[in-house]
Amino acid sequence: MLFHLVIHKDENSAYGVTIPSLAGVFSYGDTLEEAVSNAKEAIEFHLTGILEDGLEPEFKHFTLDEIKAHPDYQGADLISVDIDTSSYTLKPERFNVSWPKYLIREVDRYTTLHPDTRSSFLAKAAKKYIEQNT
């Protein structure tokens, strides 16, 4: 998805970045390249945070003409960045894994004793492992 960035630069200041399609998401950088890179990181961080809150990200799309006409963005430069948003969703997706039967049996035994499903248990375990090792 294309995200349009509004780049502001005042004399003796860093480049400020506003992302109109994501209200409240801002970034900056000492150079234009750094500002764009930081903006991409801010977008991805914001989308991840929405998912962690258990919400589905929503994108409000503005055309470049709409952004140019907005009074707050007069005199700013516009840059568009492409970010793959296809994985920023809570929608379940099936995938196949191959495990030894004994391990599947252990997971099933655990989820029988605790109020959980196999899928939910595995997702929580993976998330916990990633958080502890990053």
Image (cartoon, helix red, strand yellow):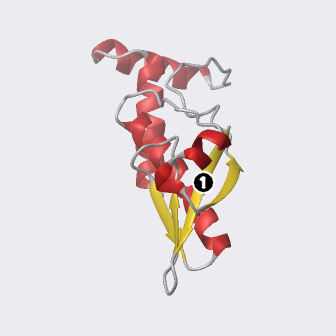
Mark 1, residue position: 5
Q: Is residue 70 above or below residue 124?
A: below
Name the residue located 34 percent from the left edge and 35 percent from the top edge.
53
Total marks placed:
1
Image point 48% across, 63% down: which residue?
27
Residue occupying the point 47% across, 28% down? 122
- Label 1 residue SS: strand
Give the percent coordinates (x, y) of residue 98.
68, 24
Q: Amino acid at mark 1?
A: Leu
Q: In the rendered image, which quarter contains the N terminus?
A: top right
Crowd around label 1: few <14 · some 14–19 · many ≥20 (10 Å) = many
Residue 23 position within the rendered picture, expressed as x and y whole percent measured from the top left: 42, 43
Of residue 90 and residue 36, the one placed in the foreground of this image is: 36
Q: Is residue 8 above or below residue 5?
A: below
Seen from the viewer's position, the closer of residues 87 and 46 is: 46
Percent from the top left, x then y, of residue 61? 58, 33
Instruction: Check the image and name the residue furthest to the left.
Output: 114
> Is 100 situated left or right of 27 in this image?
right
Q: Residue at x 63, y 48 (%)?
A: 4
Spot the residue most to the top.
Answer: 112
Residue 79 horizontal side relative to residue 128, left or right:
right
In percent of width and height, residue 43 lies at: 53, 49
